[in-house]
Image (cartoon, rainbow, N blue to C red):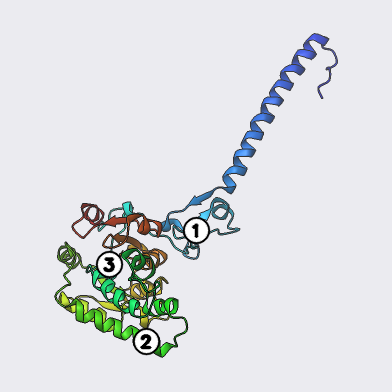
């Protein structure tokens, strides 16, 4: 590649060639490394903060899509579902309005197991009704069966799983009977979760919008809210059965945000069931799991950003304040 330059001694020309060759070799090695690093970075997924992503794009895009706008690759959520939006990190929530902070403008509550620890009553009713129908081999269901197959789910889906041969009218009649039994047995057994009044006072003091979003049928939802005298406290009540799709679809939460004029990144959701947590996370809201009936790992798997035992939990108030 390098030739002897005319008029120079062979030793000088050779030395110059060696120096030039060494320089070229070093340059080529460096260029190769830079090229390899560029290829690596171009194919790494990069988490883009929700606030920086364009309105039309998923909040988690590959570096390639950010740089060139060629393709958008949604990262799969904790529940294994492709998420169009991702909840704001807990560390960025709060009521402050300083630069870089996000203000909480809305709080959305599930009802069963979130405002109340009502699952024990539901469990008792399901034990009796499913035993009568011969479900679970004629043996009473246990709490694990209840948590995995029933808790937080819409009655129509429960009936579809357990009684696929039933028509809609029979399933609805069975569900109505089940809910009537729940209301009868729940009298005197329901009380608001510890710290709930404190949280509601904080919400009022900060002028925050609020909604109840539930898969419970309307008679049950209104009955439970009346137990604590809070039916009229909520700005709106969303019933899963009255939506086109109930939880675990995010539609009920998205409808609540629409009614209250909220964006997902300024909304906090409280949920206790896998079905509800999945809906809250998929809506884009920061979702807090309440550990009334489910193990912590179940709600974490669904994508809850924070887990609390009740509304006195110090971790919750650190988030809020």
Q: Which residue is mark 1?
A: 76
Q: As rendered, which of 276 and 69 lies closer to the eye?
A: 276
The residue at 30%/74% (across/down) is 127
Q: CA distance from mark 1 to mark 3?
A: 25 Å
Dot 2: few (<14), some (14–19), or many (≥20) neighbours within 10 Å?
some
- Residue 121: image x %, image y %? 24, 73
Residue placed under numbered mark 3 in the picture: 107
Q: Can you tell which of label 1 and label 3 is closer to the viewer? A: 1
| Foreground tag (1 vs 2) | 2
Q: Nearer the viewer, residue 66 or 317?
A: 317
Question: Which residue does the numbered mark 2 point to in the structure image?
Answer: 172
Q: Earlier in the sequence, mark 3 or mark 2?
A: 3
In primary-sequence order, the first of circles 1 and 3 is 1
Q: Secondary structure at mark 3?
A: strand
Label 1–label 3 contact, CB within 8 A: no
Question: Residue 45: x percent and y percent?
Answer: 53, 50
User: Would you say the residues marked 1 and 2 are in contact, meaning their CB atoms lie under 8 Å apart?
Assistant: no
- Identify the residue shown where x is 46% and y is 81%: 164
- Helix or strand or loop: what does disc 2 sit on? helix
- Left or right of 153, for residue 18: right
Q: Quadrant of residue 21?
A: top right
Q: Nearer the viewer, mark 3 or mark 2?
A: 2
Binning the other alpha carbons within 10 Å of mark 1 as few (below 14), some (14 to 19) or many (20 upward) gives few
How many numbered marks does the figure carry?
Answer: 3
Figure quadrant of the C terminus:
bottom left
Label 3, residues with CA under 10 Å away: few <14, some 14-19, many ≥20: many
In the displayed structure, 177 sits above or below 284; it is below
């Amino acid at each position: 590649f390098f030739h002897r330059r005319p008029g120079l001694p062979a030793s000088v020309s050779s030395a110059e060639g060696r120096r030039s060759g060494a320089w070229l070799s070093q340059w080529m090695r460096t260029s190769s490394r830079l090229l390899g690093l560029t290829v690596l970075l171009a194919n790494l997924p990069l988490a883009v903060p929700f606030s920086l992503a364009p309105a039309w794009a998923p909040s988690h895009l590959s570096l390639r899509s950010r740089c060139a706008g060629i393709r958008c690759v949604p990262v799969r959520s904790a529940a294994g579902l492709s998420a169009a939006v991702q909840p704001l990190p807990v560390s960025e929530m709060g009521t402050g309005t300083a630069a870089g902070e996000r203000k909480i403008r809305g709080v959305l509550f599930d009802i069963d197991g979130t405002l109340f620890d009502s699952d024990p009553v539901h469990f008792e009713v399901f034990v009796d009704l499913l035993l009568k129908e011969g479900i679970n081999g004629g043996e009473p269901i246990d709490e694990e069966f209840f948590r995995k197959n029933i808790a937080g789910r819409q009655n129509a889906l429960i009936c579809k799983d357990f009684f696929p041969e039933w028509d809609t009218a029979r399933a609805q009649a069975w569900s109505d009977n089940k809910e009537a039994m729940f209301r009868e047995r729940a009298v005197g057994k329901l009380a608001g979760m510890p710290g709930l009044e404190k949280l509601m006072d904080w919400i009022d003091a900060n002028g925050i919008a609020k909604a109840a979003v539930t898969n419970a049928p309307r008679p049950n939802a209104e009955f439970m809210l009346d137990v604590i005298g809070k039916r009229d406290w909520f700005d709106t009540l969303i019933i899963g059965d009255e939506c086109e799709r109930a939880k675990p679809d995010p539609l009920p939460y998205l409808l609540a945000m629409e009614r209250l004029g909220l964006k997902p990144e300024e909304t906090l959701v409280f949920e206790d069931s896998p079905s509800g947590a999945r809906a809250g996370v998929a809506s884009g809201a920061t979702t807090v799991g309440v550990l009334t009936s489910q193990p912590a790992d179940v709600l974490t798997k669904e994508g809850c950003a924070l887990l609390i035992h009740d509304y006195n939990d110090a971790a919750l108030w650190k988030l809020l304040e």
